[in-house]
Image (spheres, grey):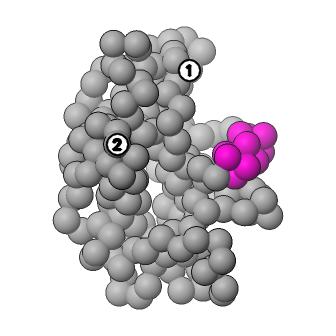
Amino acid sequence: MNSRVTIYPAGSSDAQTIASMWGETSEWLAARGIDQWQYPASMEKIARDIDRGTAYLVREQDALIGTITVDESADAEFWRPDDLPEDALYGHRIIVLPSAQGNAVGTALLDWASRKAERLGKSWLRVDAWKTNAALGSYYERQGFEHVRTVDLPHRRSGALYQRRAGVVMGSGPEYLGLEELVPEDRGF
């Protein structure tokens, strides 16, 4: 990937686009025997995150290739008070479309979120992963995350918790891809 990649806040008209990305990725995962996200995306959560300004889209030239939501909302079922949940930024709904897999887009998104956490004065970037998706857990570890613990609640499929220090960049992220953040006024595509 050697073209310009941009990340920008999702707008209210982008909720269905994010849900479609979820659907496409869940089909791709299912075809590989991974049971993650095998249910419809929550339009309510997507719309809420867009309204809060925490949902972002990733574009390479004219093609949308991914999405990420980053916020300060620690899942109380996963992150305990002694984890200091207010000292972290949390990544959710991190999707890189199958067509963009293998191009370091995920690395770029995690590096971008890590820098964002550092700019906000946080100590950590945290994610939770599907308990049965060992490949995703290994991916996070290769991206500099440490496995904190796995919370095994019968009503939750996610629960493998990972964190890495805010500001950590794995080296092939934003600079490598030319990932730059645009504000809504700069979107003009």
Give, as a single range, the part of the protein colored magenta: 41-52
Q: Which residue is mark 2?
A: 121
The picture quadrant where one finds residue 108 is bottom left
* x 60%, y 15%: residue: 155
Residue 19: x %, y % from top left = 71, 53
Total residue callouts: 2
State the SS at label 1: loop
Indicate yes or no whether the magenta region holds residue 42.
yes
- How crowded pointer 2 is (Cα within 10 Å; few <14, some 14-19, many 20+) is rated as some
Of 117 and 29, nearer the camera is 117
Q: Is residue 64 left or right of residue 15?
A: left
Q: Amino acid at mark 1?
A: Arg
| Residue 174 appears anywhere in the view | yes
Residue 178: x %, y % from top left = 36, 79
Observer-side mark, 2 or 1, equals 2
Q: Is residue 48 above or below residue 80?
A: below
Rendered-image quadrant of the N terminus: bottom left
Q: Earlier in the sequence, mark 2 or mark 1?
A: 2
* x 43%, y 27%: residue: 86
- Asked whether the beta carbons under mark 2 and mark 1 sit within 8 Å of each other, the answer is no
Q: Is residue 8 left or right of residue 168?
A: right
Q: Which residue is mark 1?
A: 156
State the SS at label 2: loop
| Residue 29 appears anywhere in the view | no
Q: Look at the magenta stretch and give its main secondary structure.
A: helix
* x 59%, y 50%: residue: 54
Q: CA distance from mark 2 to mark 1?
A: 30 Å
- The disc label shown at residue 62, or none: none
Q: Amino acid at mark 2?
A: Gly
Residue 52: x %, y % from top left = 67, 46
The picture quadrant where one finds residue 43 is top right
Q: Is residue 104 above or below residue 79?
A: below
